[in-house]
Image (tube, rainbow, N blue to C red):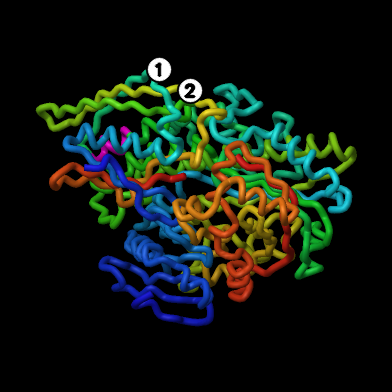
């Protein structure tokens, strides 16, 4: 299983990220998001951030997760390379995500950006489970 | 383009039935050459928009149309107040991304020897690129003022002059702002970025008027051959992006609540008049006003730099257009005036002389329509024509339109060779992230002249002047 792959898109960036579990899929999606901007080997996980989110379904939760990372990228002026995600669903069906993200402050001398991701679109956004979990995302750049 | 039929020169129709659920046909305004560059996905997006409730006449795509999300880029659609909807998919994340054109009293010969110094100074004076924060250090109160009063607030703070307001779409401030609908997150992203250019395809360009097509109208716009102009292209930065993200979530719930069948979640929407629609509109207006204040402040700093190197120089505002926005406008529908919510996503308003929204200074000729080229290629100034009201709810294209994907661009170009090629053409480029230049290479866009010719030939807007770049400052 590959972690993620990019697909052709004229104006923006489209990718699919995979995982044996939904947690792994969400980690790989976050990695794909950052990999589209900066070479991941240039990012050291020097600091960590915690994220807690909830949503009515897994797809909305995934959208919130990726949007939250874009928010942190911009407001913390940081890039991330290490992601750990825990998911659970309560009796009422509500999905909860707890995550820890490792990264560092942007240093333009070391972090050469190929793009700047500005938002996560809902266009053709979706999650499927066949043999593995798969999420498809189009990034607004 | 299966199932698409040619209606007239430069007009193609996407028939009802191209996909199930279409309420009106689609109209794509392209030449036969540009038609070949329209991807099937773009046509699907035109057809998707045609499925939305309350859509009037056609789901339209301008000649620069290309694949977007929700609406295609270059998409225009209008919705009835009764039974219609509003959708952030028809506005985009970068709310009121737009273009501002300043005309100088300088000739190109005077500026050319100092173009390197000037671009360096502008690059220093105007924060740009990734992670850039403003020189402004706006307080929370000032941020709210910018959301509510846009450029008017900026003028009151000492940026720019009163005449800037009368030469700007909506006078730089759209009514109806509701700052209470802005999340803490959007404020957090927006506050430090007020007064920054951003990255991607945003730029500040020093240009030379290369050709005048229409002497009388050019004179009205204050343009002459050999003149130096400055073009600023940017939008509402992280504030707009977060506002769109936040409201997409609300509107995706609204879609379920009101039982609206949408073909794409990016087309999340709410019925006009519902609290969800009102809240999104109020927040969108805030972002639009923020963007006008942003371009206004950047223009002020540009004037300061010019004053340093060319004392006594003048940079007057020709016009400022929004190309990602939804507006309440009156249009004739089947001979009756109706209030419509016109969505323009990567499309410029192009009102002719008959519209009261056109600034008084241009009342005889129509509003200036500003169409930036890609980095290194010509930009155009046109004037809006009344024919656009019949054809496109008074809209024209907004740029050249991408034709090559980012990944293909990265395979073919590097930032360094793009910069070197532009330098060979006499264009100076300064960028925060040189790696990002590759994706904006001139070759990834359609030829801007072809796109503009379609608009001109259709009579939507009429060519006035062509501007060529001399120096570019990029994020």
The residue indicated by pointer 1 is A47
A14 and B13: which one is in front? A14
Main structural element of the magenta stretch: helix, strand or loop? Answer: helix
Image coordinates of residue A18 in percent, x first then y, are 24, 41
Question: Which chain does tag 2 point to?
Answer: A
Q: Earlier in the sequence, mark 2 or mark 1?
A: 1
Where is the N terminus of chain A found, in terms of image quarters? top left
For disc 1, the chain is A
Report the magenta residues as a range: A59-65
Label 2: how many Cα within 10 Å (few below 14, some 14–19, many 20+):
some
Q: Residue at x 47, y 44 (%)?
A: A141
Q: Which residue is mark 2?
A: A105
Tell me residue B403's x, y (percent). Answer: 49, 61
Instruction: Determine whether label 2 and label 1 are within 8 Å by CB.
Output: yes
Which residue appears at 68% of the width and 65% of the height? B353
Q: Is residue B304 magenta?
A: no
Residue B146: which quarter of the image?
top right
């Amino acid at each position: 299983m590959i972690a993620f792959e990019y697909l052709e898109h004229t104006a923006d960036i489209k990718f699919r990220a995979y995982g044996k579990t939904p947690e792994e899929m969400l980690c790989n999606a976050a990695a794909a998001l950052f990999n589209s901007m900066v070479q991941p080997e240039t990012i050291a996980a020097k600091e960590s951030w915690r994220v807690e989110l909830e949503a009515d379904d897994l797809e909305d939760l995934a959208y919130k997760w990726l949007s939250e990372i874009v928010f942190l990228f911009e407001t913390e002026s940081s890039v991330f390379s290490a992601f750990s995600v825990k998911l659970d669903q309560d009796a009422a069906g509500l999905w909860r995500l707890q995550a820890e993200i490792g990264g560092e402050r942007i240093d333009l001398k070391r972090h050469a950006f190929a793009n700047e991701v500005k938002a996560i679109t809902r266009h053709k956004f979706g999650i499927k489970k066949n043999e593995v979990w798969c999420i498809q995302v189009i990034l607004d750049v | 383009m299966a199932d698409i039929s040619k209606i007239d020169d430069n007009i193609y129709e996407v028939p009802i039935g191209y996909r199930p659920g279409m309420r009106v046909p689609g109209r794509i305004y392209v030449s036969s050459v540009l038609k070949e560059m329209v991807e099937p996905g773009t046509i699907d997006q035109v057809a998707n928009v045609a499925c939305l409730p309350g859509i009037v006449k056609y789901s339209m795509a301008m000649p620069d149309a290309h694949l977007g999300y929700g609406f295609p880029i270059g998409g225009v659609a209008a919705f009835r107040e009764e039974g219609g909807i509003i959708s952030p998919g028809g506005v985009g994340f970068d709310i009121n991304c737009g273009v501002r054109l300043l005309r100088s009293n300088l000739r190109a010969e005077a500026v050319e020897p100092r173009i390197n110094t000037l671009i360096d100074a502008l690059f220093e004076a105007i924060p740009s690129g990734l992670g850039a924060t403003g020189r402004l250090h706006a307080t929370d109160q000032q941020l709210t003022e910018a959301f509510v009063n846009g450029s008017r607030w900026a003028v009151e703070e000492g940026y720019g002059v009163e005449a800037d307001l009368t030469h700007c779409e909506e006078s730089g401030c759209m009514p109806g702002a509701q700052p209470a609908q802005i999340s803490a997150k959007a404020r957090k992203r927006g506050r430090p970025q007020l007064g920054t250019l951003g990255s991607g395809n945003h730029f500040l360009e020093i240009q030379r008027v290369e050709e005048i097509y229409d002497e009388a109208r050019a004179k009205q716009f204050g343009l002459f051959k050999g003149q130096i102009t400055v073009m600023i292209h940017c939008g509402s930065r992280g504030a707009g992006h977060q506002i769109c993200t936040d409201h997409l979530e609300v509107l995706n719930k609204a879609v379920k609540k009101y039982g609206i069948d949408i073909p794409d979640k990016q087309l999340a929407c709410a019925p006009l008049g519902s609290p969800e629609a009102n809240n999104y509109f109020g927040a969108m207006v805030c972002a639009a006003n923020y963007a006008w204040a942003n371009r206004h402040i950047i223009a002020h700093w540009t004037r300061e730099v010019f004053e340093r190197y060319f004392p006594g120089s003048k940079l007057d505002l020709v016009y400022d257009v929004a190309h990602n926005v939804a507006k309440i406008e009156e249009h004739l529908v089947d001979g009756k005036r109706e209030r419509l919510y016109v969505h323009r996503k990567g499309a410029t308003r192009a009102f002719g002389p008959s519209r009261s929204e056109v600034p008084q200074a241009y009342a005889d000729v129509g509003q200036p329509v500003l169409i930036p080229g890609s980095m290194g290629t010509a930009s155009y100034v046109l004037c809006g024509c009344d024919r656009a009201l019949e054809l496109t709810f008074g809209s024209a294209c907004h740029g050249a339109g991408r034709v090559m994907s980012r990944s293909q661009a990265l395979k073919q170009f590097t930032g360094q060779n793009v910069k070197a090629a532009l330098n060979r053409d006499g264009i100076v480029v300064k960028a925060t992230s040189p790696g990002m230049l590759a994706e904006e290479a001139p070759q990834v866009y359609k030829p801007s002249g072809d796109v503009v010719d379609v608009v001109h030939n259709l009579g939507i807007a009429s060519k006035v002047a062509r501007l060529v770049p001399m120096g570019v400052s990029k994020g």
